[in-house]
Image: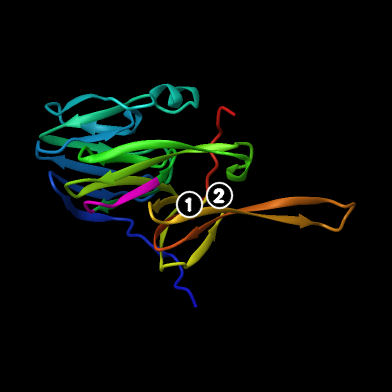
Amino acid sequence: MQTPPQLLPTRLEDGQAPGVRYRIDGELVPVLHTWLDGTVNIFFEHHVVLWKDPQLNIGIKSVKGAFKRMIAGMPIFMTEARGPGEVAFSRDGAGHVFPLHLKPGTGVLVREHQFLAATGNLEYTFNRVKGVSNMLFASTGFFVDRFDAQQQEGVVWLHGYGNVFEKTLAPNEQIDVEPGGWIYRDVNVRMDVQMFGLRTGMFGGSGNLIWNRFTGPGRVGIQSMYFHLPTSE
């Protein structure tokens, strides 16, 4: 029998990574507090900042492929905080904020609108997943952010709606997740789409039930309040 997904901690008092200390607290709309020592920057979408020290500098982090993001209604640039100093982040929604620490040589794929902040020593790219087989109700595709650690450990902080559970898959172990329910997966976890036809037996009615199937090894993050954001499509 498989081990079910496990609830991630909802509070964290003394998180640490190279160049940064952090704390996560709050009940309904949690807040990420960070302390930068000046050796590592933090980048984020500009609208998630809650407060900062006056001496902490804010600037623009260039993002490759900005035009594609603009067409899709995504932010076309990232904002960057340069310490030393304190800065806090939060999203406008009830949920669960949590860290993912990435060791050198590892990476994680994150669905759009779930990213909160990340240390500047991580490499950031993104890709649009297209096709009707990846549709999320009215949409025929979505963006996936990718974060990779190169020479140094880094941290990416994510926001999930409801509470967030993590399933660690063994090699070839699988789990099916509602398309709006998953948040992240390790880069070596494969995702396939499963479509099941449904027939009601009444007036010949039918429909499709769609799942994202994940195959290990690696981690998959699942939010209890699955969320389908409106898109430009």
Where is residue 22 shown, x and y percent of the image? 20, 47
Residue 85's x, y, as percent?
Answer: 12, 35
Residue bearing mark 2: 179
To which residue does mark 1 refer? 182
- Front residue of 175/20: it is 175
Q: In the image, 114: left or right of 54?
A: right
Residue at coordinates 42% horizontally, 48% vertically from top-left? 160
- Residue 181 point in image, percent of width and height: 51, 51
Judged from the image, the secondary structure of the residue bearing numbered disc 1 is strand
Q: Position of residue 91 (x, y in %)?
A: 38, 38
Q: Left of 161 or right of it: where is 59?
A: left
In the depicted view, which residue is nearer to us: 125 or 24?
125
Range shown magenta? 103-109
Q: Residue at x 14, y 26 (%)?
A: 54
State the CA–CA distance, disc 1 to disc 2: 7 Å
Residue type of the residue flagged with mark 2: Pro
> Which quadrant of the view contains residue 20?
top left
| Three-letter residue code for mark 1 | Trp
Q: Which mark is residue 170?
A: none
Q: Residues within 10 Å of mark 2 (few under 14, many from 20)?
A: some
Circles 1 and 2 in contact, beta carbons < 8 Å:
yes
Q: Using residue 85 as the reference point, say whether residue 3 is left or right of it.
A: right
Residue 106 part of the magenta segment: yes
Q: Tell me what residue is drawn at x 87 percent, y 52 percent.
A: 204
| Residue 78 position (above or below residue 155) | above
Question: Is 158 part of what is drawn in magenta?
Answer: no
Q: Quadrant of the C terminus?
A: top right
